[in-house]
Image (spheres, rainbow, N blue to C red):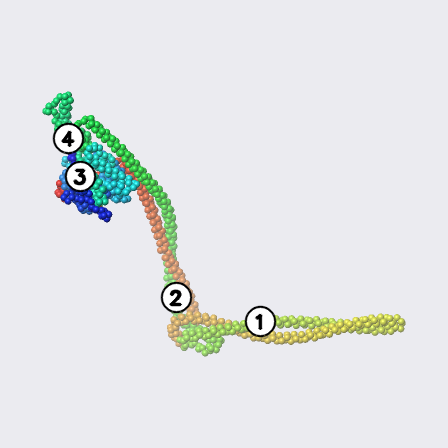
Amino acid sequence: MAADECSIRVVCRFRPLNDSEERAGSKNVVKFPTDQDETVLISGKVYVFDKVFRSDATQEKVYNEAAKEIVKDVLSGYNGTIFAYGQTSSGKTHTMEGVLNKENEQGIIPRIVQDIFNHIYTLDSNLQFQIKVSYFEIYLDKIRDLLDVSKTNLAVHEDKNRVPYVKGVTERFVSSPEEVFETIEDGKTNRHIAVTNMNEHSSRSHSVFLINVKQENVETEKKLTGKLYLVDLAGSEKVSKTGAEGQVLDEAKNINKSLSALGNVISALADGTKSHVPYRDSKLTRILQESLGGNARTTIIICCSPASFNESETKSTLEFGKRAKCIKNSVMVNEELTAEEWKRRFEKEREKVARLKGQLSRADAELERWRRGETVTKDEQVNLLETDESLLAISSTQSMSSLASAAALTTPTVGILAASAASVAATGSVVPVLAANIEEWDKERTTLYQQLDEKDDEINNQSQLIERLKLQLTEQDEGFNQAKKDNENLQAELNRLQQESESSKEEVKEVLQALEELAVNYDQKTQELETKSKENENLGQELDAKLTSLNGIREELESLREASQAQRKRFLDMILVLLRDVGDIGSVMGGQMNEQKKPTIENLDQAEEEFTLARLYMSKLKTEARTVTGRLTDLEVEKVNHQKGIEFKDKELDESRLLIQQHEAKMRSMLETMKELEEKKRNLERTHDTINEELVKLRAHGVVIGTGGSTSDVQKELNQQMEQISGQHQKQLTTLRDEIRSKESQMEILKDTLQKLQLSYEKLTGDFDKLKKEENEKSSKLQEMTLQQERREQAKQDLKGLEETVAKELQTLHNLRKLFVQDLQARLKKSQKQPEAEEDDLGGSAAQKQKISFLENNLDQLTKVHKQLVRENADLRCELPKLEKRLKATMDRVKSLEQALKEAKESAMKDRKRYQCEVDRIKEAVRQRNLARRTNTAQIVKPIRAGQNPSTITSTPIPTIRGGDHSAEP
Ligand code: ADP
Ligand code: MG
């Protein structure tokens, strides 16, 4: 159980000049003496290491000479550390990791892993191994778990043996190299995920791969543990060189801080005089505490660039290595003793203590004697060597007693203490006060450190707790919101589904109603159909009956037809008559038709030709009629003109008559006035005569009186009077005579005019008579024409009818012509023989004709009814599949609706179930989260038995590797 002193191994590896260095024209400033591989010369300065690997050293060589040993150590219960130190791109990662899946490019880690397992397979089968790995990085003095990204700031703790470890770091149990590689890959991908610039990040962070090997001898129950740290450090270059700024600078400082802490620790350890080693300055140094000056076999690989450009950096790296080389670790096997062993050891130690106590008391007694001034003889003196041993024994006993309660053995402090105590004892200057003081200080320091740790821990715990709680809170919030949303959604969906189900229920109801209606309808229809079909049957029967009667009638018809053939002759006669009529019309219309042949039985074969001839004539007639109508219209126009002229003349005549009458009236009035005047003249003459008589009388009287004297006066007076009167008369007479004369002249003029008028009247009447005559002539002509026209019209119509009948008959005739002609000829022959029989035949044929027409009508009606019935039947038949289809469709619709309803119900149920599940899940998740807060999940241990390659054994549930029986196992 004794601790072995051992120096840290420092090897140095130079990589080849890289492209950029070559491009920059950098020269190789490193020289390697040809005869040895421990030294390197750089600008004249010699550095000596345990090994110097030149640029051409292969990965395998580096592994074999720098790392391979450590496998055995770790499997023997020692701690081991390999870390790579050097500036960025000096080949640290290349050396530590290389390319994982390329055999030649593999670095130390994969080779070690492979070797560990391979080695286990060769060991004794009683050994059972448990291997677990951790992978983390230290960035800005924060430990980030690469196997669990949620662990971003892990704390470093000391276990009961005061060995620092990363608390809470993920430990993955592995049972094969592949699993280890998988773990490394996982860690690397996690590292990449969290980082934007991987190159920069990797150059500023330390990555630590920890392999923890625990073994147990199943027979002796002896347990050994070995921890192997494989560290790829951050770039060791000075910050100024990278030209970093801001946060990058901070980072760089921090990285350099941890690296300078490493440097300080190494310096302190290399110095050997300093009692305090500043492990606590950074997490890196705390983690590497055991590896540097503690219980670990440590190898430092110094990675360097050979380029002149990096010379100073290379030099400082080499200086670092040189310093580190001075460090001495005290290594021992990490053995876990059994209770029995502990007991034995305890007994041994007790005995030792008792012995030492005895020695001490003897020494004390001797001291007393010396102090009292007595001299002690050499024989009586206590043996110093013995004392030395005892002192050592005491210190170890102390440590033992302190560790009695613990499981493992030593701590570096104890080691240092022991070392210092030993040195103190060796020099012989034992100063109990100083020792006591040192002890006190040590104690105080440890307690203080402990406190510090605790505080650190608390802070860490609290912050982590806060983080966790925050995360939990947000998660729960999210979960709650999600659940709420889900709930709402589900509620809404449920409502919708309920509504849908309601509506579908209603729809189903409606559909059912409709269905019922349809069923009723269907029943009705089927009944109707039945009745119809019955009717149909009846009708069919009727039809059959009718058909039979029809057949009978047909037979009758046949017979009648035969009879009717006899009538053809009559028909021919009719045609002949008609043709004759046409001929007559022709003769009426013009003489052209006179030459028409009369149809005879002989030329009956040419009937068609004759008909065409008749048609020709008819067309001719038509054209003639057209010209006649043209002429007629002309005549009518002329007539109208004449009538107009007559009217005009009539008017004129009337006017002249009126004038004549007027003149006559005038003449009459004039004659009357002449008569009056004559009368007046006569009256006047009479009065003249009377007056003359009176005068004579008076003269006679005067002569009597004249003999007397006064008679002369009276006579005179009378004379005067007479003269006056006669003058008046004379005047009157002359005026009258004048008047008469004027009147007479007037009369003469009037007579003249009268004569003239009479003359003109006579002339007009003559004219009138002439016109009348003309008119009469014309009207007679017109009448004739219209008569002709009418006749023509009649003829035309007749012709048309004739044409139609002819056409109709022609068809039948055409069809039956030959037969008809033959028959006719036969009949003619017969009729020639029996001319009397014709009369009876004619009468019979009329009755037969009537009967035929009646029967035909009947047949027509029957066929019509039959057709109608058939149509109705067909319609009904057509309707039936439609109705059936509709019924089917409605049935289908009902079915689909029912299905939909069912589905909706099911989906609602499902949704409800899902919702319940979701709620349960959430509840469960919350519960588990709560649980997880309380307890850490247990790790499943995968023990590996030595001597077995688990990859070859598939049936073993727990892969174990047992030494020795590797080859024995299949
Ligand atoms: P670091 O991890 O120190 O920053 P890397 O290991 O990433 O440097 O190496 C930088 C580059 O140099 C890589 O491309 C790597 O392949 C190459 N390299 C490093 N060492 C060697 C070597 N010994 N032989 C060949 N190439 C090397
Ligand atoms: Mg790297």
Q: Earlier in the sequence, mark 4 or mark 3?
A: 3
Foreground label between 3 and 1: 3
Q: Earlier in the sequence, mark 3 or mark 1?
A: 3
Q: Which mark is residue 152?
A: none
Pick the residue in front: 84 or 123.
Answer: 84
Is residue 92 something that shows in the picture? no
Q: CA distance from mark 1 to mark 2?
A: 70 Å
The residue beneath circle 3 is 9
Q: Earlier in the sequence, mark 2 or mark 4?
A: 4
Residue at image coords 44%, 70%: 804
Looking at the rendering, in which quadrant would you find the N terminus? top left
User: Cβ–Cβ below 8 Å for labels 4 and 1?
Assistant: no
Which type of secondary structure does the marked residue at label 1 adopt? helix
The residue beneath circle 4 is 345
Foreground label between 1 and 2: 1
Q: Residue 213, position in %: x, y?
A: 18, 38
Q: CA distance from mark 2 to mark 3?
A: 139 Å
The type of residue carrying mark 2 is Ile
Foreground label between 2 and 3: 3
Q: CA distance from mark 4 to mark 1?
A: 175 Å
The type of residue carrying mark 4 is Arg
Q: Which mark is residue 644?
A: 1
Which type of secondary structure does the marked residue at label 3 adopt? strand
Q: Residue 834, position in %: x, y?
A: 41, 76
Q: Is mark 2 within 8 Å of ligand 1?
A: no
Q: Which mark is residue 553?
A: 2
Q: Earlier in the sequence, mark 1 or mark 2?
A: 2
Foreground label between 2 and 4: 4
Pick the residue in front: 860 or 230.
Answer: 230
Compared with 568, 303 (above or below) is above
Looking at the rendering, in which quadrant would you find the C terminus? top left
Q: CA distance from mark 2 to mark 4?
A: 146 Å
